[in-house]
Every structure is written in structure tokens, then in C-alpha cells.
Amino acid sequence: MKQETFIPEVSRRLRQLFSTSKLGMAIPPSERHRLEGFMQAGIFLGLSSKAELAELMEGIHLEVFGKTIAERKAEAPSSWVFEEVDYALYETPTYQRAR
């Protein structure tokens, strides 16, 4: 893949993700992780830098929502909370949990 095809594909995926979010639809974590992985692969392959992708994401977010990511986070902080898993159960050794 070349940068000429990578950047438009990242843009398409970001627009799709942000547009879905704007409609109030839940974005499956797998989709978000897939996009993050795709972007990381582009960084690893030298097709883009982290700063370039952050700038691209900020621009598309502004285009879709009409506000920056920081502004949107400040307005609705609860919507940015990721799934929190309580791992307290696993702090106890297995042989003690089985009782």
C-alpha cells in the first residue's frame, strides 16, 4: 500500500466512524480497534506519522461534528468513558475462588 491510498482510506474510515457516532449509534469496540490497528500499521510501515494521523483525525472530527475533539469531550465527558472491567475477582488466587 502507498501513502496515496492509505490516507484516503483512513479518512473514509474516520468519517464513517464519526458519522455513525454523530447519529447516536453505538460503535462496536471491534470497529474502533480495527481502525486504531490500521492506523498503527500505517505508522509502522512509514506511510504516515502519528502527528499526521492525529491532525487528520482532528480535521475530520471538526468536519463531521463542527467542533474539535477537546470541545466535544468537554461537553459530554461520559460519552468518552471506555469500557471499564472490574478485575478484582482475579486478584484472588484461583484455588481460593473455587470454594
Image: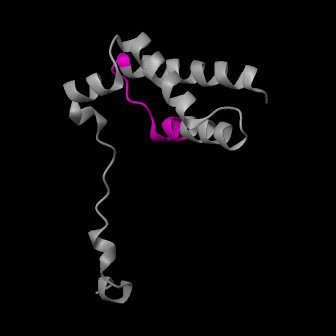
Q: How many marks do you count on the picture?
A: 0
Tell me residue 65's x, y (percent).
Answer: 36, 13
Q: Does 12 sit left or right of 91 as displayed? A: right
The answer to if 13 sits in the magenta stretch is no
Q: Residue furthest right?
A: 1
Along the viewing direction, whichever of 43 and 11 lies nearer the viewer: 43
Q: Which corner quadrant of the image does residue 48 belong to?
A: top right
Along the viewing direction, whichever of 10 and 71 lies nearer the viewer: 71
The quadrant of the picture occupied by the C terminus is bottom left
In the image, is residue 85 above or below residue 17? below
Along the viewing direction, whichever of 64 and 89 lies nearer the viewer: 64
In the image, is residue 95 above or below residue 67? below
The quadrant of the picture occupied by the N terminus is top right
Q: Which corner quadrant of the image does residue 19 belong to?
A: top left
At horizontal 78% and vertical 27% (from top left) the residue drawn is: 2
At horizontal 45% and vertical 36% (from top left) the residue drawn is: 28
At horizontal 74% and vertical 20% (from top left) the residue drawn is: 4
Q: Which corner quadrant of the image does residue 82 belong to?
A: top left
Q: Does 46 sit left or right of 64 as displayed? A: right
State the colouring used for the structure image.
Answer: one colour
At horizontal 36% and vertical 17% (from top left) the residue drawn is: 22
In the image, is residue 15 above or below residue 76? above
| Magenta residues, start to end | 22-33
Tell me residue 25's x, y (percent).
Answer: 37, 23
Q: Does 98 sit left or right of 41 as displayed? A: left
